[in-house]
Amino acid sequence: MKGLFWNPWHGCHKCSPGCMNCYVYYLDNIRNIDSSVVTKSKTNFNLPIKKDRSGKYKIDSGVEIATCFTSDFFIKEADLWREDAWDIIRQRKDVNFLICTKRIERFNECIPKDWNDGYDNVIIAVTCENQQKADERLPILLDINAKHKYVFVSPILEYVDLSYYLKSGKIDMVSVGGESYENARVCDFEWVKKIKHTCDKYNVLFDFHQTGSNFLMNGKKYKIKHSDEHSQAKKGMKYLK
Ligand code: SF4
């Protein structure tokens, strides 16, 4: 993912096949950090409401903030801190918060009291890396109250048929991405194409956000540097028209 990140807490537990080569564990290992310990950020917990000397928010209006991408917003260890995070989200109605989770089953016990139909500035995205996880998590996503709902097929491990979920009309966008770094499993462009076709059929926005490090296209395997995964996926988008 590229863009602006807010990680109010850090650390996570592997809970799904997509977690096998988790980038948080990979990067923490290089820095000798134990990723399984979930800690509240000492310096950036209040990042979205930090102001400069003139009293202006450091983060401009209108941006999208990828929230909790080195943990999971709904992880149990963060139960004590989440209410304060919601409070920060409420204070910045002028920016959008993208919350991406593999723990959507905890959603209803983790929302604030005034959530009702959801906050206008919060997108709830569910990650499903294979058909089994899609079939477990997406019925819950369809069922919850949220103003904006995305599906992240990431890291894609196989073709995932989203027809049943997209025809509900409740999903705003699908984003597909491959797995990153040394041991990355293959991302087959044919799977990406088929998901794009399903999105077109049901008029759902589609994005291919990264190729992954191990990309298969037209029968040929490509090793992609992590720094190029995003731009290569953008190039791939033109073959998806
Ligand atoms: S849920 Fe996400 S952050 Fe947590 S271990 Fe799995 S891939 Fe890593």
Image (spheres, helix red, strand yellow):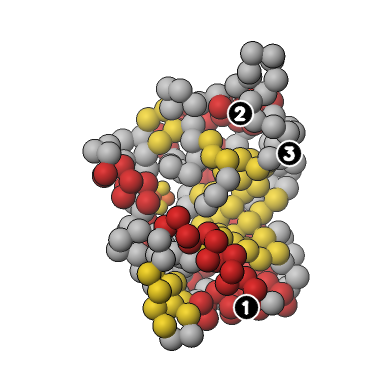
141 is higher (above) or lower (below) than 82: below
Q: Quadrant of residue 70?
A: top left
240 is higher (above) or lower (below) than 174: below
- Identify residue type, mark 1: Tyr
Q: Which comes sooner in the sequence, label 1 or label 3? A: 3
Q: Quadrant of residue 38?
A: top left
Identify the residue at horizontal 69%, vertical 32% (top origin): 60
**Which mark is drawn over residue 239?**
1
| Percent of width and height locating residue 198 | 65, 76
**Which mark is drawn over residue 48?**
2
Q: Is residue 213 toward the left or the right of residue 140 in the image? A: left
Determine the secondary structure under disc 1: helix
> Going by the picture, which residue comes out furthest to the bottom?
219
**Which mark is drawn over residue 3?**
none
74 is higher (above) or lower (below) than 129: above
Q: CA distance from mark 2 to mark 1?
A: 37 Å
Identify the residue at horizontal 48%, vertical 44% (top origin): 69
Does residue 146 appear in this view?
yes
Q: Which comes sooner in the sequence, label 2 or label 3? A: 2
Determine the secondary structure under disc 2: helix
Label 3: which residue?
62
> Going by the picture, which residue comes out furthest to the left?
32
Marks 1, 3: nearer the viewer: 1
Q: Is residue 128 toward the left or the right of residue 168 in the image? A: left
